[in-house]
Structures are given as structure tokens and as C-alpha cells.
Image (spheres, grey):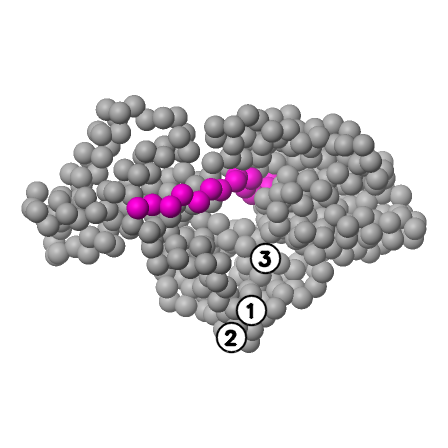
Amino acid sequence: MTARTRLVVLAVSAPVIAFAIIGGLVGKTWARDETYQHLRVFEDVASLISSSYVEPANMTHVMRGALNGLAEGLDPDSAYLPPDEAKLYESGAKPGAGETGIALTRLYYLRVIAVRDGSPAAKAGLEAGDFLRAIDDHPTRDMSVYEGRRRLRGAPGSTVRLLVIRGNVADPHEVTLTRAALAGPDVSGRMENRSIGYVRIAAFGPDAARAVAAKAGELARAGAGSFIVDVRNTATGSYESGLAVARLFVRQGTLAMKDVRGAARQTFAAAPGDGAISQPVVVLVDNGTSGAAELFAAALSGNRRAKLVGEHTEGRAAVQKLVPLPDGAVMIISNGWYLTPSGEPIHDKGLSPAVAVDVPYVEFGAPAPTTDPILKKAIEGIEGGK
């Protein structure tokens, strides 16, 4: 190995070694010999690339790719941010008030978890499960979720170009979105018929519990004897807010559990005064139901307070911790996750609906369906007394 290669490996291995030292956060503590064995292989591979690749390799780029892969091998919510991105992340700076309405995760490329109601992305026909192969000509293969979110935001009225994959990888679609301040309430509702109230939760914001209570009260006064709560395509909001909304419906029992590495399991239970909404409930879910929405759905279904109707959910319920690295980079690492009331994992598993509904596949650019099979199935179940 040349002296130059050794210096490169040493410089880039520092955060890797630091990450290994902090290894209590990432799983079972590695045995010392195993740790050194992996680092030796890492050094050999770096040396091989430096000495044998067809042209002089950009080792900084290569090493960043390796560190990205290290984080990606954990889960989609863990990420390695190089020093330049880390500074932006820690500063909390936002590139603008204009948004596209896309919630992101990672699966090889950046992937759409959900699309906010009435947003530029929704109007353009993007859906949960779509892949973003590029944002403004910047490939997303090695782009962190944080960087993707940052690039999607900007000044209201500005545009962003996306290369979208749905179905056929060989046939991507170029879409231009005009960023806008997201309009519309987090919580809305209507009477679905004379006796069923429909409550839509688009995001679990800090005021969601108050808004849901108010909307449910309004619909109950209008004659609602049962409720449909729709958390499809809902992927934003805090876990605390998800639990706060669940408390409106669950009078007693365990709402959720939380496991954090190095700490005792935490249990969240209903308290006196909870369960103010006593009418029968059905919760609509799909593959865009994620995070706080999954925690809410799990709390109700786990206490037999509601049946879930729709599709399997995303499976995203991790808690992240920021770990600074010696070179100014940071590691965003999942060091905990929420569990269902019975202690089953949600993260990477998702929730299976009690009543599964097949939703027709829609080609990109095709007209949106005129019927809603999940909502229809829920109404039929309530009217049939099931």
C-alpha cells in the first residue's frame, strides 16, 4: 500500500472507527477481533481500488459511498451526512417555505412514502411507492433523505424537476413541480351518510388531538353514530401527537411501547379521562400510512377499539439520534423504536389490516380512479354491522 493510500484510508477510517466505538448504539457489541477483521478488509479494499482501478479513483467520493452504504445497511432512517451536509442539518436552515408535499424514505433510490393532500405532488399524480431517480439532475442513488428533502424545498413559485420511476425502471417520467406553501388543514371531516362521520388526518401536527376532538364532536352533533378515520398517505407528524390522538379513542389499556438502546422499555398507557370519543371506529390505512399514523392505528387496533381496513402500512417507527464524527460529519442512527400495544415491532414490519382491500394499479399519467375501494369497503362493513 502506498503512503498516499494509507493517509486516505486513515483519514476516512477515523469516522468508521469512531462509529465502531459508539457501537453500543447499533446492535450487539462487536467482538474486538471481529471489529479489526472488518477494518482490515476495509483497508484492503480501499488499497485495491487505489492501486488497481482503471484510472485514479476519487477516494473521497469512494469513501463517502462506503459510509453511505454503512448507514443504508441499517435502515432507511439512518444516514451518514458528510461535513457540508452536517453543518446545514445542525443549523436547522430551510431553503424556503415552498414545498412539494412529498414524504421520503430510501430504498436504493429515494422513494416516496406519501403525498400530502392537495399538494403540487398530488396534483401531478405522484403516489406512495414511486421512486425519485433524480432531483434537478442530481442522482438520488447516494443521496440522503435529508438532502432529498432539502432539494425538494425552495421559494414558493420556484420549480423542481423530478425523474420518477413507477413500475418500469426503463421508462422514467420527468415531472416538473412548482413549489408552494402547503394549504389545507391537518384535520378535516364530513358526514359520509346520515350516520357515519368521516375524519381525515393528513398530518399529526402539534394541534391534531384538539382538531380531531373538535371535528368528531361536530360530526356527532350532526348525527354520526360511528366514525371512519382516514390516515392513508399520512406520513408526517410526531409520535407524541399520534399517541395524543389515540388517547381520544382508547379509554384503557396500553397504547404503545418504546425500546431505546441502553434504557428500560417504556410503556404508554391510557390515563383517566382518555377515551372521550366512544363511537365505533374504522381506521383506513395504506402503504403510505407511516410513522405517527402507524402508531395511532396500532394503538386503536391493538386495543380492539378499531379495525384497520385497506393495505399493509409502511413500517416506519424508529427514533433517531445524532452522533457527531471527528471530521465534522454526523451519523443519524436509529437507536430506538416504537412497538404495538402487545410488544410487536412496527419498524420494518408495518401493520396488516384486518380487512385487506386490493387497490387497482394506476399507470403514471393515467386518470385517477373515480371510486375509492377502501372507503367503500369500510362503509359496507359499518352498514352491515361487521
**Label placed on residue 158:** 2
Residue 384 image offset from top left, x and y in percent: 84, 38
Towards the viewer: 330 or 45: 330
Label 2 CA crowd tier, 10 Å (few <14, some 14–19, many 20+): some
* Marked residue nearer the N-terminal end (3 or 1): 1
Q: Residue furthest bottom?
A: 157
Towards the viewer: 258 or 152: 258
Res 191 quadrant in image? bottom right
Report how far apart the C-alphas of labels 2 and 3 lie in the structure: 19 Å
* Residue denoted by label 1: 98
Residue 284 image offset from top left, x and y in percent: 70, 45
Residue 362 image offset from top left, x and y in percent: 58, 56
* Residue denoted by label 3: 115
Foreground tag (2 vs 3): 2
Type of the residue with mark 2: Ser
Q: What range of the chain is rendered magenta?
A: 309-326
Label 1 CA crowd tier, 10 Å (few <14, some 14–19, many 20+): many
Q: Is residue 90 in view?
A: yes
Q: Residue furthest left?
A: 2
